[in-house]
Amino acid sequence: MLNHAFYRRCYLQTGWLPMQPLTRKIHPGELCQIQNGYLQPLLTLTDLHLEVDVEHSPSLPLNPLGWCLDQDVQQIYSGTGQEQNDEGHIDYWSKQVVSLKRPGSFIFHGHEPRCRLITNWSALKEDITLQVTQGRYSFREVYCITAVAKVERWGLAIAGGKRARLEMTAATSETDSFLLLSHESAKIEQCHNIDCP
């Protein structure tokens, strides 16, 4: 499983478990089971008709520094430039080439991480546990999503073999590989032995 190192490092560095696949949406208040390594939604807290209403936080910013992750990655080329377009404006570009040493090596960047939380969990948990364990499922089989983090944009590349390489460009003057990877204009120009989920 090539993405194991990424999932482990993401949890250890950010404190959040990544979804599998990363594009899957989940919301606070969903009750889920884990089936074949994937969270499978069963129902929501609203479906339980709890005695106390579920309260959610607004979208809260998270520290962006923890959302730059890599393992066994080396930047082997970095170039930027600018040119004047037909309308007289300056267009910037950046090109990066990174090498990923071994299978499972990765580079990830999540841009503008934010989270939403259930704010009154302590008032809900006993009612939820009672209803779920007595009426529907065994307690060990069900997980309640109490908080969800999401990023505005993200980029992830995982090496599928030895000496993997990723060449990417974007319309920016940015020279940081992490920021380029998740830039809205980022394009993969060439890749060798790379899984881009």
Image (spheres, rainbow, N blue to C red):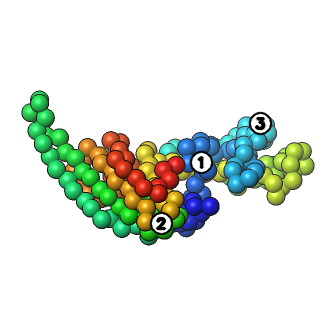
Res 61 seen here: no
The answer to whether mark 1 and mark 3 are in CB contact below 8 A is: no
Residue at 43% across / 50% down in the picture? 155
Label 3 environment density (alpha carbons within 10 Å; few <14, some 14–19, many ≥20)? few
Q: Secondary structure at mark 3?
A: helix
Disc 1 crowd rating (10 Å Cα; few below 14, some 14-19, many 20+) is: few
Tag 1: amino acid = Pro
* Residue that extends furthest to the top in the rendered view of this protein: 87
- Residue 176, quarter of picture: bottom left
Residue at which label 3 appears: 47
Relative to residue 107, is residue 113 depicted above or below? above
Dot 2: element? loop
Tag 1 residue: 21
Left or right: residue 178 versus residue 41 is left
Q: Is residue 121 above or below residue 91?
A: below
Amino acid under disc 2:
Lys
Q: Earlier in the sequence, mark 3 or mark 2?
A: 3
Question: Where is mark 2, residue-wise?
Answer: 162
